[in-house]
Image: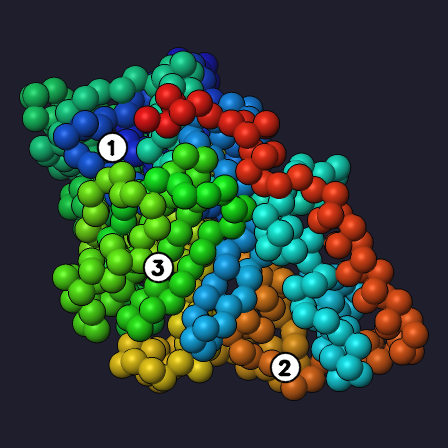
Amino acid sequence: MRSTDWPLKRVVIAGGGTAGWMVAAAIARTLGPLVDLTLVESEAIGTVGVGESTIPPLVAYNRLLGINEAEFMRATQATFKLGIQFDNWRVLDEGYFHSFGICGKDHWSAGFQHFWLDACERGMAGSYGDYCLELKAAQAGKFAHLPDDRMHYAYQLDSGLYARFLRTMAEADGTRRVEGKITAVELDGESGNIGALTLDSGTRIEGDLFIDCTGFRALLIEGALNAGFDDWSHYLPCDSAIAAQTRSIGPAVPFTRATAHDAGWQWRIPLQHRTGNGIVYCSHYLDREAALERFTGNLQGDRLTEPNFIRFTTGARRKQWHRNCVAIGLSGGFMEPLESTSIHLIQRAVLRFVRMLPLREISQRDIDEFNDQQMTDMLQIRDFLILHYKATERRDSAFWRHCAAMDIPDTLAHKIELFRETGRVFRRNEELFAENSWVQVMLGQGITPRSYHPIAMKLPDDEMIKLLDTLRGQVDQTVASLPAHAEYVARYCGASKAAAA
């Protein structure tokens, strides 16, 4: 078969924003002239635009597409991110840090936490975070690229500017953008597949494969194909958010902050020239006016934008690939931004779709495998998010009493009890959050193991002290040598004030 005879080469992306342009950039850069790629979006339709905090896989995604990091960061006003500071989640006035790094040094038979737990019993150990480079660097407000990629990091960025950056790249690689609102989705009467999109201008866009990036509206996957939706709000009860941007009042720190309140939590994400802010809450326990008052009362710096009010239902589309349509981004499901997974889920879906592109007819086995992998990703992330709410000692409000008492999935219950009993965590099926992430959050939320692997007892006191002192010393020495994060960003990828306006 010649490339000109490929029967599925017309790919239509419905919707722009971060999701649409991430899809376009990846497909155009990967397939080039093999694909006839069209993206339909309307300037009149706004985007949610709050996905400003990311996780480390985005670093690999950008490298995969050949994106120059400094250029990308300059264009998106980005800063580096080493993790998330969680305040008031287990109890009021206390916090913990979920870093992207690895604490200590694992043995092949057991993770570092087992040695640390044994050392705690012997009265020899410091805080678990003392042995993590990324955590200590974040707390010191420092950052630098290190040899052998020893510093694990992500980005804090302007998602609107990221979409604009990717649009420029995708259009240079051959993507055709069409302006207009989608007014109708035409189905083939025989196959049930999508045949074309009709725009408000009367233009008709035909395609062989359609990517639904229309956000919460899910115009194609749900509006036309009725793929179904699994509602997870009984596990994750927050259903509302308010977001706004403020002027920076100090140097940007290399971490995102998530501060719990009596009906949800608030975020603060420092970019180069502004700060992203938001409040996430459950409308059953806090009304919109009270949430807005609380949100604006906690803002730091002059407000640059009007509050953006968002309603959502946490959950996943049952079929994220249905017939000849793939839902990517919010059209495929929504996870609240507690662990910054929104952009990651876009990335996972588009790379998975590119790997499964059909040559001739669409394979139902490909569809089933795609949907199974997508749902597995989302279920595992769902469980990790639920952990933050369920494992709490807070009983100071009706919201937190509800979270503490609610039923949780058996998969999460098993993971919690396994860790509580043995100190063990097992990662399955390329699970996003690795062992160290689960350990940091479970310890931070107050789940302390009653036991640990016996290998830790092999070390006599002097060797245990030497191990811990060496690990902590290496971390402290490296952190002391690092420059201030804000200084490094300004030197490496500083954006002009004019670009920020």
Q: Is residue 34 visible?
A: no
Position of residue 208 measured from the top left corner of the image (x, y, whole percent): 29, 28
Where disc 2 sits, the SS reads: loop
Earlier in the chain: of badge 3 and badge 1, it is: 1
Q: Amino acid at mark 1?
A: Ala
Point out which mark residue 449 bears: 2
CB atoms of marks 2 and 3 within 8 Å: no
Label 1 – label 2 distance at C-alpha? 48 Å
Residue 48 occupies which quadrant of the picture? Answer: top left
Q: Amino acid at mark 2?
A: Pro
CB atoms of marks 1 and 2 within 8 Å: no
Where disc 3 sits, the SS reads: strand
Where disc 1 sits, the SS reads: strand
Q: Which residue is mark 3?
A: 266
When the figure is inspected, residue 370 is found, relative to residue 271, above or below; the finding is below
Q: Amino acid at mark 3?
A: Gln
Q: Which residue is mark 1?
A: 14
